[in-house]
Amino acid sequence: MDRRTRDLVKSFLKATLPREELERLGSIQIRDKGFGYDVFGAEKETFELAYFALRWAYLHYFRVESSGHENVPTEGRCILASNHSGVVPIDGAMIGVDILRKLSEPRWMRAVVDNFAAAVPYAGLFLQRCGQVIGTRRNFEELLEADEMVCVFPEGAKGTGKPFSHRYQLLRFNVGFVELAIEHKAPIVPVAVTGAEEQAPMLFNIKPLARAIGFPYFPITPTFPLLGPLGMLPYPAKYYIDYGEPFHFHEEYSSKALEDPHRLRLLAGRVRKRIQGMLHKRVKERPGIYF
């Protein structure tokens, strides 16, 4: 954006957002390298516009309820490790809005996105402008070294492509986030998102077609492809976001643990088990799915 556009964005937000939310947004700073962006291409004004749009979905469409914010550090490096689901990956965006709105000291969550999402024309650039980063090890490390809050989805893209019959059954976790947590001395906060599984129930996955067009999956849902692109709009499932007690693996294990793949797999399994338990508890307690 040029300076005039940035000023227009500021004026628009000032006229439409409550004062408290404006102050929270204003407290978020980027490490501007002199061109209005940080080293990852994040632009504060784009992030603020995205927040404005996602805020409506958070409040009125998914009607997000959350708990456990006392478990999320208000400063310093940390990793949010969350389950991933819903065909269209909106769960990460709802976590980001929730962190900004509900944490005692608002923070800017930087999500590590799959290479596929980052490569989609226009979408990839938009994600970068909003502060999200491509999931390379170097990017992850630089964010932690800068004491950022990083959100990771250890199930990977396969998580969003789970069939509805496997809802709330977590896949095997990748171990890279555990390795980096130990190496860079960052706590891991387990995050359980309930509701996203029902926003787009995937009945079938046409794998040959997905491979042919370079997608991680090609979903068949009750409305897609029957209704065309409109069929990909998520259903208004009610979201619940729960933050669990953090893991401090860097305090339990030395750097020697990084040389033990079996140990890293077991630690990733501990995080997975905690999130799985949180999901089961919330699914059992919630009064309904859409209402």
Image: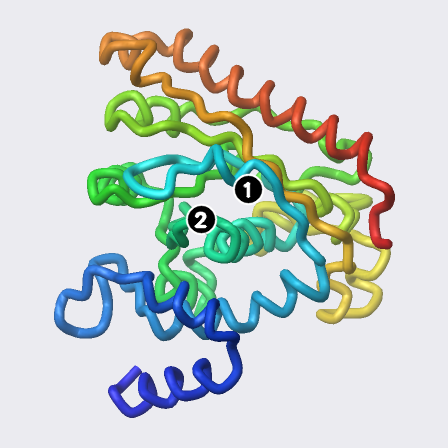
Residue 52 appears in view: yes
Amino acid type, callout 2: Ser
Q: Where residue 189 sits: x, y (%)?
A: 46, 31
Q: Where residue 20 sits: x, y (%)?
A: 47, 68
Check the picture and name the quadrant holding the N terminus.
bottom left
As rendered, which of 219 and 82 lies closer to the eye?
A: 82
Q: What residue would you read off at disc 2?
A: 104
Check the picture and name the quadrant holding the C terminus.
bottom right
User: Which residue is rendered at x = 64% and y = 41% of the image?
Assistant: 193
Q: What residue would you read off at disc 1?
A: 157
Residue 221: mark: none
User: Which residue is rendered at x = 66% and y = 63% of the image?
Assistant: 59
Label 1: how many Cα within 10 Å (few below 14, some 14–19, many 20+): many
Amino acid type, callout 1: Ala
Q: Where residue 216 sits: x, y (%)?
A: 57, 46
- 67 sits to left or right of 72: right
Alpha carbon of mark 1 to alpha carbon of mark 2: how far? 31 Å
